[in-house]
Amino acid sequence: MLIAGRACLILALVIALYGIGASLYGASSGRREWVASGRRAVYALAGVLVLAFAILEAAFLRSDFSFTLVAGHSSTTTPTFYRATAVLSSQEGSLLLWVVLLGLWSSLLLFLTRRRAREVAPYATAVLMGFAAFFCSLLVFLESPFVLSSPAPAEGVGLNPLLRHPSMMIHPPMLYSGYTLFAVPFAFAIGALITRRLDASWIRVTRPFTLAAWGFLGIGVILGARWSYTELGWGGYWAWDPVENASLMPWLTGTAFLHSMMIQEKRGMLKTWNVSLILATGVLAILGTFLVRSGILQSIHAFGASTLGIPFLVLIVVMIAGSVGLVVSRASELRSEHRLDSLLSREAMFLLNNLVLVGMCFVIFWGTFFPLISEAITGTKASVGPPWFNRVIVPLALALVLLSGIGPAIAWRRATVANLRRNLLKPALVAVAVAAALGAFAGAAESPAALAMFALSAFVLAVVTQELWRGVRVRRTMSGEAVPRALVSLVRRNRRRYGGYLVHVGVAVLFAGVAASSAFQTARDVELQVGQSTRVGGYDVKYARATGELQPAPNGRLEKIDFGAELQISRDGSPQGTLVTKRSFFPTSDPNLGPVSRFFEGEATSEVGLQAGLRRDMWSAVSPSVADLRPQIAEGDRVFTDAAGALSPEQRDGALAQALDGLTRSYAGDPPPATFRLIASPLVSWIWVGAIVVFLGGLVAIWPAPRTAPRPAAAAYAARVARELGRA
Amino acid sequence: MDPSRKRKIRFVAASACALILAGALVYTSFSASSEARTPSQLASSATPGEVYQLTGKVQPGSISSSGTTHSFRVRDRAGNVSIPVSYTGALPDPFRDGREIIVDVRKQGSTFVGERDTLVTKCPSKFTAEQKT
């Protein structure tokens, strides 16, 4: 199977190169059959890559340790779900996933647009196949997932325990879908520049894919944050780590593009800006992949000294140079058809929103690459931490939320004072009332930035509610429908607009959650003995009892040992529930360690105890001390070493399980003091609620409009044309 | 006002704003940054009270804990010079002997005291380079 997998990758590389050649030859010679052949090459590429991925996936599922990749990232004790997804935790597997998704999304795009954008599509196909050829080359020549492990080990290393979390397994396909889908508008923008077809048609063709890219990348980012919150033992969801930043940057420029492209569609303006924005987004998507694999920046994530840094750098330089060259050479065709009529207009608000989003992206870029920048300027590597990011990003985030409220309420071209008063006065009053109430009664005035964010979020909600209510009222006047039905018809008839409004609501809710949980969080690191209590954010937390248990794998062998704690929460003497948190100890495969100590010298991960609620989350993680167990562990190792050869493997496994069971009972029965991190975090759940609303809004916006809607207009138009013709 | 003059004024105002913001960004980033240092660099010269970003490996066998305060030594990635570090707070899950860490520290007496919530440990297996012989 290794050979078959390798053959698939080589074939994929050949197909990608053929696709580039066929598409470019077809476009330059005008021979449509070559263009069609180039398009079919994309379908074939997707098929071959899916086959390669299936071969690798099957090897993981059957724990075929003759594949070096399987032996290094999975084991027989890894649960089936994580065995199926362990492929994503490796560099080679994630690169393969990248190009598989690129092939699939490109195939879908080219199939759906096979009768549209005929001039631009062949060049876009060549660009997409160029990306595919690059990634296939990496997989064939530098990082092959199909390498023989000889002799095959009896057991694999296993999946990194930190990655054993459902959201971490969905996170990579979402992120990579986002990155690869952003390659689609990037490729069409290049095609439009080459062919000088710089009207809004390339934007219309790729709009659903741009929106899907934005949605997938956003889901990927939020899943990463959720994983960080519920799996890592620090209780935060965002650390401004380079890898996190790398995924956020293209999302920000993609969001800016989704707004500014409307101005080009409606008024033929901002052509240079739009094309530059999407080209930058494409470059940033690749930059994210480069950052993860080059090792140029220090990060939580281990970027080993990979061999992929230089190839990615070359690709980025080629992308930037090609993009800049094309934009500069097409400057005259990129001139706007209209000028900005007024600074008080929706266009101006969109432009401001774009500047804020791009500003955020630039700030994050600056902070992420600051070690390299400072080294270049001062000769000393220095870095900026989360406090700097928070200080700089907070004002921009406030401006962004404010603009997301003003945008839907202001008129296109030129807004009058009367228009502004009519649309913004009531929402502004709501915002002031919310700020006053929260400042006076909820103690929110302690953090002016958080208070401002709550007020602006209320402003956005009020604007959208007002817009919806006005729309519903008009529908009811026209059709006499009941309110719920009128609301549904209103949204159905203009999904893009109201989907966008829903996204704004989600963003406002999300930012309110971020503001509350950042400004009013209470955290304590404390050592407790069983029976002792501590106080966190107005809640009493009591260490009620210690727990210890063995966790068998599906194949009957031990997967891990859990030592944990049961915590009772109360407020003013009233019970508020129980938190169960533990630390899982996974065995290492180090042959120099004894069979018992292997479980305590390997990876250990926190299993967070979380009581989530709409008002507040209670979060806990425990670090049990195993120092008191060291003599028993050493004794166990000595006994097993002495008995080596006298026991069959089955007897040995059984005796080991008994010994470890004794250790866990010993820990649970007479636990030493354990250290805890306890956090009371208000409104943090609203971050996830807001993200779901954003996702739903994106779905509404991307959903195809009903086919029945244009018919009356088309019929009326046909009738008018017929009348005109009759008169002629 | 003449539209082209109006555009020029807008352009100058926008450029001035952009320059001021860029200046603020540069100033705040340089003033808030902490210099990256290896253990051997800090062992030879470190100003008490100043914050440095220390990068290195946890020296095997050096970790000891008392309540929520943890003491350990950090040594150069390639080399034997090590410095004592004291850190109060929760340790990241992957933290253990031999792991690469990054932590903001401040010299106090002969020990380097870690700033709260700045200790990060590199994830050991994600995208690590292959051990090529």
Image: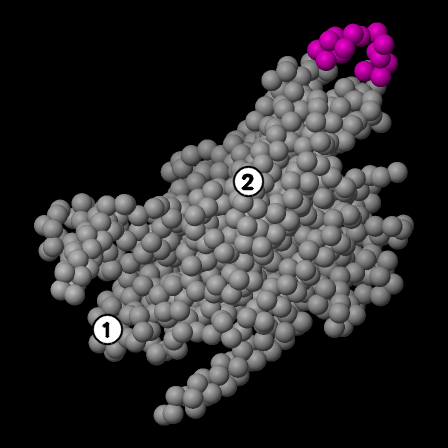
- The image quadrant that residue B2 belongs to is bottom left
> In the current view of this chain or complex, which residue is farthest to the front?
A728
Marks 2 and 1, the one that precedes in the sequence: 2
Please say whether residue A100 is one of the residues in the magenta stretch. no
A661 w.r.t. A535: above or below? above
Q: Which residue is mark 2?
A: A40
> Residue A174: percent from the left, percent from the top?
52, 43
Structural crowding at the residue carrying mark 2, measured as other residues with C-alpha within 10 Å and reported as few (<14), some (14–19) or many (≥20): some
Circle number at residue A419: 1
Q: What's under tag 2, amino acid-wise?
A: Arg
Q: In this image, A289 relative to B55: left or right?
A: left
Residue interval drawn in magenta: A640-654
> Residue A86: percent from the left, percent from the top?
63, 32
**Residue drawn at x 40%, y 37% as measured from the top left:** A576
| SS assignment at label 2 | helix
Residue situated in front as seen by the camera: A611 or B28: B28
- The image quadrant that residue A146 belongs to is top right
